[in-house]
Image: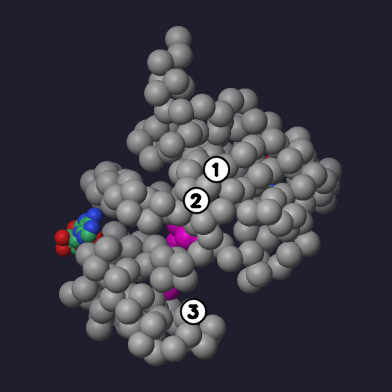
């Protein structure tokens, strides 16, 4: 687990598009922080900078007690979950969950223990031998989350992970995410344009508009505002 701090972070894309403008945000150790705002407000860019998938134009990004501006993604000890599940279609659920750990040469018994634990947490035990094509959308998204969980990272980054699911599944998955966060307590940054998701998931919610942070508060305070 780790604290994540954005200190005066800017992102300017080529063509002089200022996607993120002087973003100052402290995400506490173990906190579930939601970045919310309309399309184009810079939420994905902010998340991708934390992941190391996008360079920071100006400012500093801290993860734990390290400044990580120039640290490649693989050295950031962070796991990301995207809206398109990015599962390997030719592998079973079990193999999908284990793959990243195998690459990192983690011992077999340890891999099995982590995979079984994640599968139990996500209700995937009965599906371990299936391939992604034989799963529902919600199940696939659970596998994608399982792949992040088994890495036991310092932080989870999620970019609209529920936006491809139908309304009923989204409600279920919100509950699953709340439970998971309660159990694991891992620092999480979650991007969505959906205000209901923001309010039900976030310990705090950061509202972005045109690249700038407008407000950051608990859902209760945001909701009670006139
Ligand atoms: P959001 O996730 O809130 O929809 P983004 O972070 O994707 O917003 O985009 C913020 C702004 O940056 C938008 O104006 C978008 O068009 C622009 N943008 C995003 N990615 C790129 C890119 N690779 N090159 C140039 N402009 C980009
Ligand atoms: P479907 O789209 O077919 O309804 P879901 O993806 O919603 O499938 O659920 C797949 C299975 O996962 C179900 O059998 C359900 O019992 C189980 N499940 C649903 N929600 C959870 C949860 N929060 N935690 C663990 N297992 C769950």
Q: Which residue is mark 3?
A: 100
Q: Secondary structure at mark 3?
A: helix
Gap in angstroms between the C-alphas marked 1 and 2: 7 Å
Name the outermost residue toward the front.
65
Q: Main secondary structure of the magenta part?
A: loop
Q: Is residue 221 left or right of residue 55?
A: left
Gap in angstroms between the C-alphas marked 2 and 3: 20 Å
Is the Cβ of the residue at disc 1 closer than 8 Å to that at disc 2?
Answer: yes
Residue at image location 76% in from the left, 38% down from the top: 8
Q: Which mark is residue 187?
A: 2
Residue 83 falls within the magenta-colored stretch: yes
**Image quadrant in which the C terminus is located:** top left
Q: Secondary structure at mark 1?
A: loop
In this view, the mark in front (1 or 3): 1
Q: Is residue 223 above or below residue 95?
A: above
Please identify the quarter of the rendering in which residue 210 is found: top right
Q: Which residue is mark 1?
A: 28
Q: Is residue 101 left or right of residue 180?
A: right
Please identify the quarter of the rendering in which residue 16 is found: top right
The answer to which of marks 1 and 3 sits earlier in the sequence is 1
The answer to which of marks 2 and 3 sits earlier in the sequence is 3
Q: Is residue 43 above or below residue 205?
A: below
Which region of the structure is painted magenta?
80-87
Q: Position of residue 201 (x, y in %)?
A: 38, 40
């Amino acid at each position: 687990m780790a604290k994540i701090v954005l200190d005066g972070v800017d992102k300017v894309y080529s063509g002089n598009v200022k996607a993120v403008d002087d973003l100052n945000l402290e995400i506490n150790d173990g906190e579930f922080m939601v970045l919310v705002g309309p399309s184009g407000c810079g939420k994905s860019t902010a998340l991708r900078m934390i992941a190391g998938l996008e360079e920071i134009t100006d400012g500093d990004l801290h993860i734990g007690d390290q400044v990580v501006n120039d640290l490649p993604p693989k050295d950031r000890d962070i796991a990301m979950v995207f809206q398109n599940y990015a599962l390997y279609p030719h592998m079973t659920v079990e193999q999908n969950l284990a793959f990243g750990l195998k690459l990192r040469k983690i011992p077999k018994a340890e891999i099995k223990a982590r995979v079984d634990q994640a599968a139990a947490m996500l209700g995937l035990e009965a599906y371990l031998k299936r391939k992604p094509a034989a799963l529902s959308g919600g199940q696939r998204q659970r596998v994608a989350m399982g792949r992040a969980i088994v890495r036991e990272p310092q932080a989870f980054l999620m970019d609209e992970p529920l936006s491809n699911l139908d309304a009923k599944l989204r409600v279920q998955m919100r509950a699953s995410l709340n439970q998971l966060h309660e159990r694991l307590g891992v620092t999480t940054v979650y991007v969505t344009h959906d205000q209901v998701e923001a309010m039900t998931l976030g310990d705090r919610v950061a509202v972005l508009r045109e690249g700038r942070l407008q407000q950051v508060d608990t859902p209760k305070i945001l909701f009670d505002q006139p």
